[in-house]
Amino acid sequence: MLDLNGLTKEYGAFRALRGVTLTATDAEVFGLLGPNGAGKTTLLRILATLLQPTGGSGTVCGLDLRRDAEAIRRAVGVVNGGMGLPARLTGREILRSFAGLYSLNRAHTEARIAELDERLELGRTLDIRASEYSSGMKQKVVIARAVLHDPALLILDEAASGLDIFARRSLLDFVQASRAPGRLTVYSTHVMSEAEEVCDRVAILHHGQLLTVGRIPEVLHATGERTLERAFFELVRAHDQRAGVAHAV
């Protein structure tokens, strides 16, 4: 589903990504982890063809990042923590209008909305205006909009940011249930406990560089730590020590 080889992204002298190489398969939740500024969002924007890499190569769902941008966009759904909704429309109207962008017929659209209502517990969000939504209600509709066309790749970039405990629980349960043949979910976060709960494998980024890729038990074993958060700090410390970067005690 993903095959990336030496991807780089540069903004002048600043290197946002430094030779990222990884693969991810279908029927898994793949975690992309790191602090703010690690390069996670840059990488995800490249996967969604919103940015072009400076160097390297890659495929998404078997499609070339450089040559097949339009086809990739139709195969991908994206959710981040800051996406907006048209305030005057209801959730149902938002989903129906978005379905038109993907040429979904009316029957298919209504069936899909009913399915997502059940999976995400959309309830009254479907029939009230977005201007009345809480943050959790808004994010549920944003997720429903992103997966309405049943994308092969779902990208969740800090999707739980700002959600209350109930909305966060609903999101994590949805991610857990997203595994399916021919489908991949990439879950990007800096909250390690979320990754431990929902991810099958993780990649840890730091200053644009890939520190490790593997199943969580493998990462814990390699670092000798008992939690993913502690393993992350150990990997970062080891990297920065090699690079001559001091850490405050």
Image (spheres, helix red, strand yellow):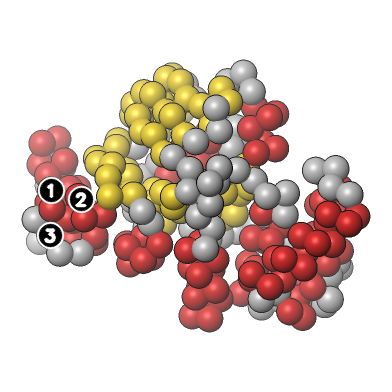
Residue under numbered circle 1 = 222
| Total labels drawn | 3
The CA span between labels 1 and 2 is: 5 Å
Residue at horizontal 61%, vertical 74%? 136
- Quarter holding the C terminus is bottom left
The answer to whether residue 171 is seen in the rendering is: yes
Residue 131 is situated, as x and y percent measured from the top left of the image, at 78, 73
Residue 96: name its quadrant: bottom right
Could you tell me which secondary element the residue under label 3 belongs to? loop
Residue at horizontal 28%, vertical 50%? 215
The CA span between labels 1 and 3 is: 8 Å
Residue 230 is situated, as x and y percent measured from the top left of the image, at 18, 61
Residue under numbered circle 3 = 225
Q: Which amino acid type is shown beneath numbered disc 3?
A: Glu
Work out whether 108 lies above or below 193.
Answer: above
Question: Observer-nearest residue: 11 or 213?
Answer: 213
Work out whether 126 lies above or below 217.
Answer: below
Residue under numbered circle 2 = 219
Work out whether 227 lies above or below 124.
Answer: above
The CA span between labels 2 and 3 is: 8 Å
Q: Mark 1 touching mark 2, by CB under 8 A? A: yes
The answer to whether residue 191 is seen in the rendering is: no
Could you tell me which secondary element the residue under label 1 belongs to? helix
Q: Mark 2 touching mark 3, by CB under 8 A? A: no
Q: Mark 2 or mark 3: name the one nearer the start of the chain.
A: 2
Q: Which amino acid type is shown beneath numbered disc 1?
A: Ala
Could you tell me which secondary element the residue under label 2 belongs to? helix
Q: Which amino acid type is shown beneath numbered disc 2?
A: Val
Categorize mark 3 by other alpha carbons within 10 Å: few (<14), some (14-19), many (20+): some
Drawn side of residue 199 relative to residue 172, left or right = left
Q: Residue furthest right?
A: 106
Residue at horizontal 13%, vertical 53%? 221
